[in-house]
Amino acid sequence: MPITETRGVRNNNPGNIDYSPANQWQGQLKPDSAIEKRFARFDTPESGIRALGKLLLTYQRKHGLKTVKAIISRWAPAGENDTAAYVRAVEVNTGTRPGAYVDLTQAAVMSGFVKAIIHHENAGYAYPDAVLAEGVRRALS
């Protein structure tokens, strides 16, 4: 039986970002309810990773969320996720102590965060390092 791609990988949206007409992400495709009813779709994985990173930066800059727990609690609300397990997974993946402040403007921190989110949202999927690095570079530029 062939392994099917996760929705996030199929949509080049590895963070499973909800579609919103208010968001004009670079590389976002026009909505098509025949393909996807809820989530945004992107032209490349790098564009989807960029959007994920930009959204995380907004959480930190606009909403003042400075810890893994604060950021992931907004990213993946408890009503839809095991947020505590998600937080632990990101902390382990980024080498962050529980409750420690994180600075997502640092490429290594952003990369670890994004990689952990992609892994969690897409059943353990990992993009090649070059794809991840380019998406993060675009998010931070």
Image (cartoon, rainbow, N blue to C red):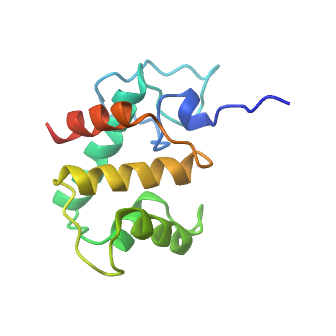
Task: Work out which residue is located at the far right of the displayed protein and give it.
Answer: 1
The residue that appears at 41% across and 64% down in the rendered structure is 72
Answer with left or right where residue 110 lies relative to residue 119.
left
The residue that appears at 31% across and 49% down in the rendered structure is 111
Answer with left or right where residue 110 lies relative to residue 79.
left
Percent position of residue 30, x then y: 44, 18
Percent position of residue 23, x then y: 32, 34
Q: Quadrant of residue 73?
A: bottom left
> Along the line of sight, which residue is nearer the eye, 56 or 45?
45
Answer with left or right where residue 130 lies relative to residue 85.
left
Answer with left or right where residue 59 lies relative to residue 90.
left
Q: From this viewpoint, is residue 38 visible?
A: no
The residue that appears at 29% across and 45% down in the rendered structure is 53
Q: Is residue 96 above or below residue 1?
A: below
Q: From this viewpoint, is residue 94 visible?
A: yes
Q: Is residue 138 above or below residue 76?
A: above
Percent position of residue 82, x then y: 59, 69
Q: Quadrant of residue 138?
A: top left
Q: Quadrant of the C terminus?
A: top left
Q: Quadrant of residue 9?
A: top right
Numbered circles on residues, count: 0
Q: Quadrant of the N terminus?
A: top right
Percent position of residue 56, x then y: 29, 52
Q: Is residue 95 above or below residue 116?
A: below
